[in-house]
Amino acid sequence: KRYFALLPAAGVGARMAANGPKQYLTVGGKPMLRHAVDAFRASPLVAHTYVVVSPDDGVIDAVLPADLDGVTVLRCGGATRMDSVLNGLRALDGQLTDDDMVMVHDAARPGLTAALIERLIEGVGDDPAGGLLALPVVDTMKRSAPGADGVSVSAATVPRNGLWSAQTPQMFSYALLLRALGSAPDANAITDDASAVEMLGYAPRLIEGHPRNLKVTLPADIRIAEMYLANKED
Ligand code: CTP
Ligand code: MG
């Protein structure tokens, strides 16, 4: 089997509200995106890494020099994460075969390691449904309802047992992922790739990830990511 990485990196980082897209912020001495790319470059199991950026991206050439081996930039990012992934997959038509495995990974998860990539590949094995890194939920989960004066109130407690937080990479065969995302009803409702695959009736494997693989979303997350990056043992 051949394993490829596809990194959507065409978001604007609205919640980070930084001076530019968050994937280019420096975290632990390197741009966030570069950490994620380097994790895939460090794994001998990964054949090639593709990075999807916005067509008008003016920063990527400085972050990923053209001569960096094992990496190709695709300038076909779309309006939603799902569009960016789907456009990237379509751009690889003819280069990937149906059975090639594609690991989709958020550019905003700098804590990924080659060991976690290999854990995913080993954990999924030959399962045709693919799989994803995820973590069992540790907090007690509440279902909110609208309360008085615009506050949210806790209407119920959702049993935590059986709930997992999805991480990336999420890995599927090229053919399955293309079919799933191509037939998903609403790009805005699809916040990860596994959800589109589930809609086709597949049950992807949950492989235990790691807290260091957090998605950097809010400004405070940068400090947490840096703490993990400083400690390779975590
Ligand atoms: N992404 C993308 N194309 C989009 C939107 C998101 O490639 N149109 C990518 C982001 O660059 C990121 C990943 O999808 O690597 C996860 O998305 P998210 O954390 O939501 O990033 P942003 O959309 O940039 O952030 P926000 O939602 O706060 O604007
Ligand atoms: Mg987003």
Image (cartoon, rainbow, N blue to C red):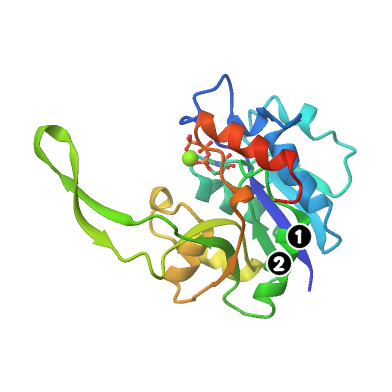
Instruction: Residue lying at the far left in this picture: please name it.
Output: 148
Q: Is residue 215 visible?
A: yes
Q: What residue appears at the point 43 percent right and 51 percent down from the top-left corner?
A: 187
Name above or below for residue 173 compared with residue 167. below
Q: Tag 1: residue type?
A: Ala
Can you name the residue that lies furthest to the top here? 19
Mark 2: which amino acid? Arg
Mark 2, secondary structure of its residue: helix
**Residue that carries the numbered disc 1 in the rendered image:** 115
Task: Give the structural element (helix, strand or loop) at label 1.
Answer: helix
Instruction: Tell me the tag on residue 119.
Output: 2
Residue at 36% in and 64% down: 160
Left or right, 6 with reference to 114: left
Q: Residues within 10 Å of mark 1 (few under 14, many from 20)?
A: few
The one of 6 and 76 positioned closer to us in this rendering: 6
Q: Which mark is residue 157?
A: none
Please tell me whether residue 7 is drawn above or below residue 221 in the rendered image: below
**Residue nearest the viewer, comparing 55 with 130:** 130
Q: Are marks 2 and 1 in contact (CB under 8 Å)?
A: yes
- Dot 2 alpha-carbon crowd within 10 angstroms: few under 14, some 14 to 19, many 20 or more: some
Name the spot of residue 112 as percent of width and height, x first: 69, 50
Vertically, is 1 above or below 132? below
Quadrant of the rendered structure where residue 65 is?
A: top right
- Residue found 31% across the figure and 66% down from its top: 159
Does 6 sit left or right of 138 as displayed?
right
